[in-house]
Amino acid sequence: MEIPVYVVTGSLDAGKTTFLNNIFENRKVKALVIQFEDGEEDLFSGYTGHRKLMIPRNLLDQQQEQLPGQIYEAVQNGEWDEIWVEWNGTAPFSCLLSLFWDPVFPTVCRLKKIIHIADAVKLEFLLSGMGIYLIDQISESDIAIVRNCHTKSHYQHISRLLEGVNPGLKILEMSSDSKLIKQVLRQPDEPVCSFLMEFMFFICLFLLAGIISGWEGFPLSRMVNLFFGMTLQAVPFLLIGIMLSSVIQILIPDGMLERWFPKSLVWGMAAALAGGFLLPVCDCASIPVFRSLIKKGIPLPVAVTFMMAAPVMNPVVLLSTFYAFGGNMAVVAGRAGIGAFAAVLIGLLAAAFQRKTPLLLGSGRSRLICACGCYEDSQKTKSLAGKLVLCLRHGQAEFFRVGKYLLIGILAASVFQALGNGPLDFAQYRGGLAASILLMMAAAFILSLCSSSDAVIARSISSQMPAGAVMGFLVFGPMMDIKNMLMLSSGFTKGFIVKLMLVTVTVCFFLVFLLYGIRGMSL
Amino acid sequence: MKKTVRVLNPQVLTEILCQMSFGGMIVYLAASGAYLRYVTPRMRPYLYFTACIMGLWSLAGTGRLFRPRYKIRMSHCFLLIIPVLIMLLPHTPIEISSYNTIGESSKLQMSSAKEENENVMPGLYKVEKKIMVSDDLFGMWYSELYMHMEEYEGYTISITGYVLKDPKVYGENEFAVARLAMTCCVADLAPAGIHCNYRGVSDLKEDTWITVEGILTLNYDDYDGHKYADPIIMVTKITPAEKVEGYVYPY
């Protein structure tokens, strides 16, 4: 029979030994405890049946190849119910894993669970300091147990921090009761198995969809068409944005952007607008870039302005607007001008509302942390080739992280559109200017069009809608829509996204309404 | 007793498989031209770019195929599996009938596909003052007529499309000979048509495919202070035509 192996990780003094004591105090099992360090508190050994195998640090460093044999011997020398491994944070975690990947082990024991013990008071400091090994441990863990948390908000903060590193992590609060131990020892899910289950589920959905497609009047074919149109359109641009943001994040050293970036807000804003104007990225691409700018320490108002301005006023979009409106410069100038002005206002307001609360999910103070798993190489690779490979991996992780929100957004948008009678259904409305503007903004939000194509749609409804409403559509659509909102939620806190949405809606609406409603500007 | 340990990492394996199949699908779409059902020809290089990135990721992944990792995450792979599954669902190109109630198609203004006006447009016979629009050049001629109508006044034109009637937009003797036009992707499909003036409009059945022959006439449209020279075809002859597959990509 395979003996279950439990690994307890955590930095020095995190409370690993105390936790082990807790475990054995309440349960009478025969356990082999392998300690890879000298914890300050000695292992509780009041019960017979426990054996402690100490492996000093220098042995791990110098004679690693002998370790599997030594451990194997210890495992064979007794009838163990469980094996517990205590691992500290000063060596790469893959060291331990490669020990257990040795071919002698799978026959006798099996890695069951990895538990991380975190000291809430020190965690943030440790993450930003020694980082790498600790992040590695957290990201490989099944369960994290948090100690020293006294207030609820502190606990939430730490949870966010941990989830930022390992999104699927189960987080528990340290206590000495048996409920905690029960939860720790519960049978884990098999990832491959659950993947296959999910896969079967989707196959079933697929077959079901195949049956439904035969029904009269159900617009499945239309949905599939819309879905693919939007996917093939958005995925390449998302990839461009992601690769760009990976390059910013990895190839540009920390602090360099900050140093070179204009210090004053005015020049910063000017730089953001210029960047937005120069980069031919649509809204799918500007969100990953926005995130990497924030991580690199660019001030929030400037980064927000960039994100809002880039998809409205870049040359590709302006050119398509120019063509769509048959060379009508008033519309092009209006779109660029109002877009730029709105972007600056949104940047300033969003920053004003977002003073203290964190906006990046799980980032804390450290800019190094990301859940992509690239950290395991990031220290070693100094060469350009190595960094390029790292860029690729980072991009891949980012793609999977952001992409799922894009996918959900596209699915939602294609269902909305397929159920309607075409993209211009809402144009039948007749009403006042304010209501029309709001309606068109809502339409832009739901349609989630790429900013390089929305001008054509806007043009085709321009004769049925007041000019202001069309402008609202043109300015607001690229800044915020279903897929943008979902993509933002992959990296930012809900509070921040809600504030950003509210500010964007308000600013766009009032700018357009004031310009078109009061001065009666005509398209 | 140092041994090389070969334990397959199922996460990396699944990622590679998913990326390969997604990339393969993209390459197939781009190479076979099937992508034109969803996006415009402009997207083709971007699609190849996407496939390249997928390939590069897979290649980079092979290095980690045997690196031990305890925590296996796989559900993110559905991001690539779901589109492939959806692609396999039975679906046909969007039908024109889903768009016949939307008006204003003739107001769509596109850029000229060929900016070099000096070059002779294919199908143009200057001496005979005749324009024969072949099916694959519908979009190009559509843009050209709306941009430079002044040059073609009085020409005889022959063009194939479907009958688009919309009482809200067109007068009693008017209809449009139209095709579905895609600007960016299938989500912005809209009919693009040229105005026709014809006495027997009531005999024409909506959504039927016809070849229209007639004289191009200028119609100045004053709209929001901007003057547009729009073409109108004074129809002389209508013949039934075969349905034309595919969309029009005006720009």
Image: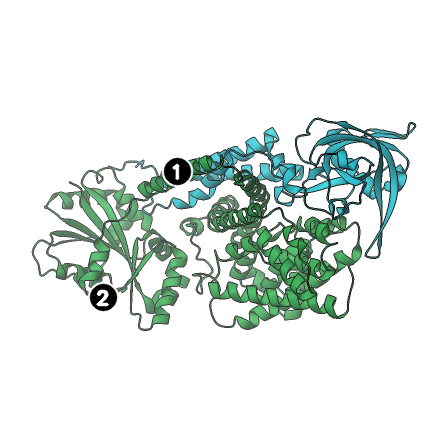
The local secondary structure at tag 1 comes to helix
Viewer-proximal residue among A136 and B158:
B158
Q: Viewer-proximal residue, A129 or B20? A: B20
For residue A441, side relative to residue A297 (left or right): right
Side of A382 relative to B126 (left or right): left
Q: Nearer the viewer, residue A408 or A57?
A: A408
Quadrant of the drawing holding the C terminus of chain A: bottom right
Residue B232 visible in image: yes
Determine whether A10 is above or below A191 in the image.
below
Disc 2, SS: loop
How far is the residue under mark 1 from the one under mark 2? 43 Å
Q: Mark 1 — residue?
A: A204
Left or right relative to B240: residue B75: left
Q: What is the chain identity of the residue bearing mark 2?
A: A
Tell me the amino acid under the disc marked 2.
Answer: Ser
Residue at image position (59%, 51%) is: A447
The residue that mark 2 highlights is A175
From this view, report whether residue B138 is shown above or below residue A467.
Answer: above
| Residue A268 in view | no
| The label number, if any, that marks residue A414 in the structure image | none
* Chain A drawing hue: green
Q: Which chain is cyan?
A: B
Q: Are marks 1 and 2 on the same chain?
A: yes
Across and down, in percent, residue B218 comes to 88, 42
Q: How is the image coloured?
A: by chain
Q: Chain of mark 1?
A: A
Image point (33%, 54%), residue name: A137
